[in-house]
Amino acid sequence: MKIKTLLLGTSLSLIPQFVNAQCVATTDCATLGYTETSCPNGKGIKCPFGDKWACPSSKEETCAEYGFKYDCSGTGYASGSGTPCNNKYASCTCASGYEWKDGACTKRAGAILGQCTGHAKNCKIGQILNIDGSCSDYRVSGVEPVGVVVYIGGDGCGQALALEGLGEYKWSTEEIDIPDLFNYSSEPTNDFDSCENTKTVIDYSYKQYGDSAYKYYPAFWNVYNYAPSTMPETKGKWCLPSGGVLDSIYQNKTAIDQSLTKINKENIGNSWWWSSSENSHNHVWDWTASSGAFYYYLSAYKGTSYYVRPVIEF
């Protein structure tokens, strides 16, 4: 008697074909015959069209030959996928932070802090961004939080707010229209280039003043030199938030504050913040956390000291 078998997907679907028999369908591997009592050496297939067994004679047929070879145990594994065959699975379900790849549960690649990688598409605004690049709703044991996600772009690039403010600083001590820094005459909420803005000002100021540049653009240089004690390797990767990112903070203030409270960090508050969005040679768009409003005239004079709190790309 010849048996034809077919494997569909990652779950067992063996379809023996018999002549002059009645059909009783099943997808249970043990019922289909891979048991200790079905055939010699525990190998064989039970006919789903009756009570007969089909045992291999010249060629051994085993569960492994049909892809059932994973025990789905160890670090990163959650359980087996589908119906087992001789206690083996065709694939495994992986634990959080792991993915099934090349026949194993491997650690899922996280975001690279300070670099847009598109990983933010896996996160939500208000979640905690961890030092390993993962996002979580709560503090993860043994993993340091970096910030709280405050913006996610359509390209999957995100920005996270630092867990602390740096204090109040002047945007600049001089009235200069920064070359290559776009001037927003209105709608600073369209500006999401926090880190590009910051790099432009840092590069310009250092070219002009060298090691003394921090005296002329203190808000930017304090952000640039920010290095949390738990993650000093992020020094030089922090940015002064742009108008659009600050607007996103206000629109999601409740969720962001909730996460900051969970990990006992400084909330958004009601201060006036500097943005990195320039308006003219002597004015910048500032933002009030209490109402979400932006201003650029008089109160937003570059020489005024306002609250500074960095963001980091991921």
Image (cartoon, rainbow, N blue to C red):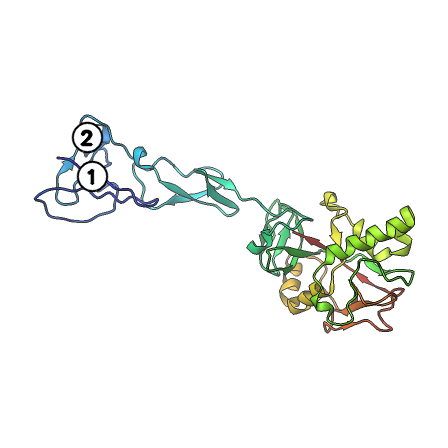
Determine which residue is flagged by label 1: 4
Q: Quadrant of residue 192?
A: bottom right
Q: Position of residue 215 (x, y in %)?
A: 91, 54
Q: Secondary structure at mark 1?
A: loop
Closer to the camera in the image, 186 or 236? 186
Q: Is residue 45 left or right of residue 21?
A: right
Q: Quadrant of residue 19?
A: top left
- The amino acid type found where label 1 is placed reads Lys
Residue positioned 84% across, 59% down in the render: 178
Q: Which mark is residue 56?
A: 2
Q: Quadrant of residue 167?
A: bottom right
Callout in the foreground (2, 1): 1
- The amino acid type found where label 2 is placed reads Pro
Report how far apart the C-alphas of labels 2 and 1 lie in the structure.
12 Å
Q: Position of residue 213 (x, y in %)?
A: 89, 51
Q: Is residue 132 left or right of residue 171?
A: left
